[in-house]
Amino acid sequence: MTLERTIVALVSTPSGFAGRTDVLAVPTLDWNHVEPVNEALEQLLGVPTSVLRLISVENGGMMQGGLVTYHVEAHGEPDRTKLHPAEEPEADAPFRAPYARMGGPAELLAWADTEIERTGPAVQVRTWNLSTVHRLPTARGPVWLKAIPEFFADEGAVIKMVAAHDPTLVPEVIAAAPHRVLLADAPGDKCWPITPEHVELIVPRWVAVQNALAGDPQLPPSAVPMPSFGLPDTLTHGDFHPGNWRRNGEIIDWSDAVWGHPALDACRVLEYSPPELHDHIRKVWSEAWLTHRPDSEPLEALDVGRRASHLHNAVKYQEFLDNIEVSERIYHEGDPQDELRAARELLPRDRH
């Protein structure tokens, strides 16, 4: 069965706003997955395009489906016979990401071209309020260009921190600048569905790096401190789930990183894993920490960490909402409240 949704594009061009497309079907459900969107628009308009931002969604939910309207930049003069009159999108708005503005994608690619030599056109794979990602063909294979908003961690610096202790755990950083990074390809699919083997491949190595990095904070702290249980505050990935693990053993997407208790990462894995794997995850994680900190109490830390993780997520999602433009808040509306409810459900029943 083909999974698809519908889109409308409001198209801006080098000579000004050109109009809107008809409703088009694209073979993807995810709102931020824009590679198929650009493919459909180039076929329709005869010129390459970049999606700048989401404007509205009708009848969709959970970041998927429905009719999605985007603001799109055409790189060249499109076939205007395929466009209809429409109201031009607002030229600017508070908290709009630089890459969501006219000329933003081109500026990112111009920077990347000072660092690598492309062998073909760039492909915009994803874009939304938390990042934009391009795939760049090179003679050495795909290179990934990622840009993020200012409220995130410096991803290039964080990856280098991890690589200093285990370079096999992260992609190679080819080049980095504030809020942008060029990464070598991380071969292999995401670790969906998660298996015991994935846990054994990733978790002990990450624990070893966290233990090695423990000490003076190198990033802002988590907003939700918790008792140590003999474990150190250290670098936490911040979104440590199997979708950010690769089958080659690498971990990607480090922009949520903060300094905090390592149980926050372990609990994130548990949130994204089926119940039948929870005991195995707890066992692998706790045994890994006991290897480095024999006097610690990792299982007790996990029990408290479950609530702390939801509270940490609630603060993080609220930070997203506070720092992104209004039209893109649909991605995260309700998330802080969901996390707070989840934390409340973990309280002892007699305290409700």
Image (cartoon, rainbow, N blue to C red):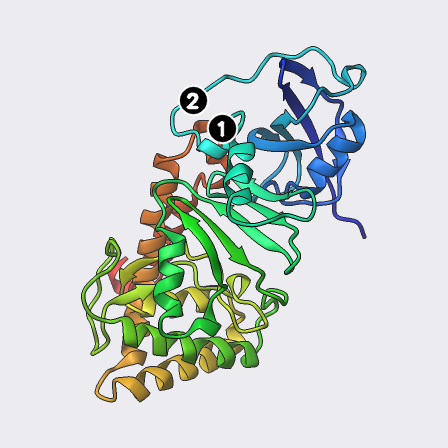
Who is closer to the viewer here, 207 or 102? 102
Q: Are marks 1 and 2 in contact (CB under 8 Å)?
A: yes
Who is closer to the viewer here, 18 or 320? 18
Q: Quadrant of residue 16?
A: top right
Which residue is pictured at 20% across the width and 70% down the height? 215
Residue bearing the label numbered 2: 93
Question: Is residue 237 visible to the viewer in this orientation of the structure?
Answer: no
Which residue is pictured at 26% across the width and 56% down the height? 219
Q: Please tell me whether residue 216 is drawn above or below residue 25 in the rendered image.
A: below
Q: CA distance from mark 1 to mark 2?
A: 10 Å
Q: Please tell me whether residue 102 is drawn above or below residue 217 in the rendered image.
A: above
How crowded pointer 1 is (Cα within 10 Å; few <14, some 14-19, many 20+) is rated as some
How crowded pointer 2 is (Cα within 10 Å; few <14, some 14-19, many 20+) is rated as few
Residue bearing the label numbered 1: 327
116 relative to 345 in the view: left or right: right
Amino acid type, label 1? Ser
The circle on residue 85 is none
Amino acid type, label 2? Ala
Q: Position of residue 197 (x, y in %)?
A: 56, 81
Who is closer to the viewer here, 197 or 318? 197
142 relative to 146 in the view: left or right: right
Q: Position of residue 111 (x, y in %)?
A: 50, 40
Q: Please tell me whether residue 317 is drawn above or below residue 90 in the rendered image.
A: below
Question: Is residue 198 visible to the viewer in this orientation of the structure?
Answer: yes
240 relative to 294 in the view: left or right: right
Q: Please tell me whether residue 95 is drawn above or below residue 39 in the rendered image.
A: above
**Mark before the other along the chain sequence, 1 or 2:** 2
Which residue is pictured at 75% across the width and 26% down the height? 23
Which residue is pictured at 25% across the width and 84% down the height? 293
